[in-house]
Amino acid sequence: MATRWGIIGTSNISHDFAVAMGTLPRTEHLITAVASKDKVRSREFAEQFDIPNAYDSYSLMANDTEVDVVYVGTLNEHHYSVSRLMLEHGKNVLCEEPFCQNSNQVQQLVELARSKNLFLMEAMWMFFTPAFTILGEEINKGTIGEPLQIISSFGTPMSESLIQQRNSGGSILELAVFSVYMSQFLFGPEKPQIYGTCGQLTECGFDKDASIILKYSNGRISTFLSHFKVNLPNEATVFGTKGNIKLYDPFWSATKISINGTDTIIDVPQTKKATRYGNSVQLIYEIQEVRNCLLKGINESSIVPWSLSIENAILVEDIRKKLGVTICK
Amino acid sequence: MATRWGIIGTSNISHDFAVAMGTLPRTEHLITAVASKDKVRSREFAEQFDIPNAYDSYSLMANDTEVDVVYVGTLNEHHYSVSRLMLEHGKNVLCEEPFCQNSNQVQQLVELARSKNLFLMEAMWMFFTPAFTILGEEINKGTIGEPLQIISSFGTPMSESLIQQRNSGGSILELAVFSVYMSQFLFGPEKPQIYGTCGQLTECGFDKDASIILKYSNGRISTFLSHFKVNLPNEATVFGTKGNIKLYDPFWSATKISINGTDTIIDVPQTKKATRYGNSVQLIYEIQEVRNCLLKGINESSIVPWSLSIENAILVEDIRKKLGVTICK
């Protein structure tokens, strides 16, 4: 029987999520409803993707008994409240990254999912991509010797007015989250020492950019940058004593990987409609993981377990505090 | 009349210096003497490059009246004492980078050169390369808008035993010096705030690696790394609000530059003998600058003035102190 999905929010990433799902068998994945506070957008989205139900309130989605699991693709600042509403109404939840505005909210969602025996996962799609899997395997095989240094970046220019309008919390929370997960994956679960700074803060007090260094034991360092004002390489490279592995731009969804200087292109399915973000068809891997977990009756993925999301949220929060960023609201 | 050069030290960089000079007219540049404490090495070097005088003591070089200017290419830890000896004996000096072990030594050499009315320059050859000149011109033209972020690295693997034997002072002093100069060139002379850390220190207490962030006013940040244990990209990229300019590996002597994604290859002379470091023929540009200064009777280059070397040495010293590096001796 197909997994019945409800999509909440008609953002670009929700669009890409629906496009990606269109490449999977309809016997396995069906979008049965979409919800947006904007009635017009909800209807347009439903028409575009042939979705039977279009809601103009999140409560209607929460009460739809034909929905097994919801994908929360709203603005970041609403992730917590929407996910909470859905869990309270007995819905399984896949919530887009960055998960919540702070670690306390993540912990609350996890407790709620646990107490209600529901599936909950942060949509950290990077972890499910073939390139990332290859990275992990090659590191374990010792292909680059002892990994000592990670360098990564995520910078994408945005107009000053758009930056000032944002309430979701700055470049560290929104962009560096991938670099923090990369650091956790390779050097964690140890809590690192934090060094770094922001060049510019908004009037609200959050970071338009950041340069961050995480120091782990045994000489292991992760150095990364996030930026709302300039475009950065958006690559991630792990440097070891015997070579390096690079995930090309966009590293969180790479389809090209360099292993000690040799490039490999990764085949991914073609989508019928164009996606709005690069390589977004790779959302299918996390979509498949959600179905697998639901079929097995397990509430958290072993790839992005609750503990990892909590550790990530704490680390991101610590980084922001250390760098003098105001955690809005 | 040709400028008569004395070469002190038979290191790899001295070798490349002589190879590079071999591409310049002998009517302009002649190597008339070489000095090394090792008599055999001195004689071999003289034979290899057809140099009339080979000395086994630095004093003999200091007293050679047929030498106009000496190039100090010894181990870093001897740069100060050898340069001092030469200035005291009335010789003009081009001293390999990194200049001295600390800023006090640089200031002393500058005072000595000033009082004796002699030419003195740190061999910061990066500044004289065509790629670097293009970088400066394009930045001034506004090709990449407002430059806000520099990312650069210099990492080259070395055996643990070789690292432990070194007395010259760690990856920051030896490798990051180029990134510090790059930062000064683009964002200086303002003194930045310093953030960063080292992953590993030697028994002596100096850094095997470092991740460093310099924060300048108006949101300008320079983020760079140095490493003795792993190979890094060894590129430098300046990111602006309208694009970026990258100096390819080795960025301090690049012959390839990317301007907003378009690559340009820079033609440089062919050498008769192979150089030991990449693109070392570009040492000719600083060699020509020295002759030009001597011909004009000026004691410091406007490209690498004494004040810039002093500021660099102070900044490098501050970085090392801030990061907990022991400044040996």
Image: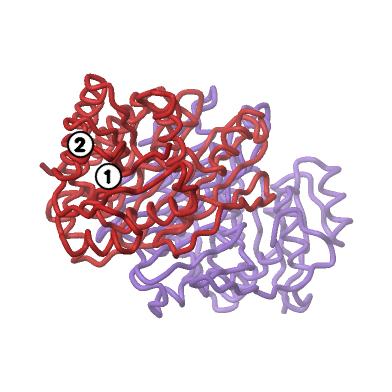
Chain colours: A red, B purple
A206 displayed left or right of B253: left
- Measure the alpha-carbon separation of dots 2 and 1: 9 Å
Percent x, y for residue A58?
16, 46
Circles 2 and 1, Cβ within 8 Å, touching? The answer is yes
Q: Residue at x 24, y 55 (%)?
A: A200
| Foreground residue among A6 and B182 | A6
| Foreground residue among B206 and A15 | A15
| Foreground residue among A312 and B14 | A312
Percent x, y for residue B156?
63, 43
Q: Number of labelled discs?
A: 2
| Mark drawn on residue A72 | 1
Q: Residue at x 54, y 45 (%)?
A: A237
Name the mark nearer the viewer: 2 or 1: 2
Report the quarter where the N terminus of chain A lies. top left
Could you tell me which secondary element the residue under label 1 belongs to? strand
| Mark drawn on residue A114 | none
Q: Residue at x 62, y 42 (%)?
A: A244
Relative to A93, residue A266 above or below:
below
| Mark drawn on residue A86 | 2
